[in-house]
Image (tube, helix red, strand yellow):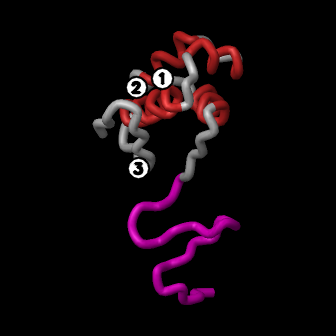
Amino acid sequence: MKMAKNENSYGRIQSTADLGRLVRAHRKGKGLTLETVSGLGNLSTRFLSEFERGKETAEVGKILKALRILGLDVIVQPRGGSSLSACGTRSTKTGADKS
């Protein structure tokens, strides 16, 4: 996922590098430095820099904290034609009730 300068491309993430690039573009688009985000979330600038460079072993809890600070959400959904409703139940394309 290559992004032009100052262009945020939100959507499917397939690697830690994709997520890092998206987060870096989002942070820079908001005019925030690593130091500012670090101070807001009590996260080290080293961690944030490694996360933005796609470090595969970055701690999930810290990643979620950084995303929250930056105003980003994580949405997980199944691949293909079905999705989960707001209450967590699976619905299909046809919408037929299978109970």
Q: Is residue 72 above or below residue 32?
A: below
**Which quarter of the image is occupied by the N terminus?**
top left
In the image, which disc is placed on residue 54? 2
Residue 41 on the magenta segment: no
Which residue is at 63% across, 16% downward? 36
Query: Could you tell me which residue is drawn at 60 percent across and 34 percent down?
Result: 67
Q: Which residue is mark 3?
A: 12
Q: Is residue 23 shown above or below 84?
A: above
Classify the position of the C terminus by image quarter: bottom right
- In terms of sequence position, does the residue under pointer 3 or pointer 2 come before the other? 3
Look at the numbered discs 2 and 1 and tell me whether their residues touch, using CB distance below 8 Å. yes
- For marks 1 and 3 on the same chain, the one whose residue lies earlier in the sequence: 3
Give the numbered dot on residue 51.
1
Residue 77: give its label.
Answer: none
- Extent of the magenta region: 76-99
Main secondary-structure element of the magenta-colored stretch: loop
What amino acid is found at the position of numbered circle 3 in the picture? Arg
Residue type, label 2 = Gly
> Residue 28 in the image: x percent, y percent?
49, 26
Q: Is residue 43 left or right of residue 11?
A: right
Count neighbours of disc 2 (C-alpha within 10 A) and say few if under 14, some if 14 to 19, many if 20 or more.
Answer: some
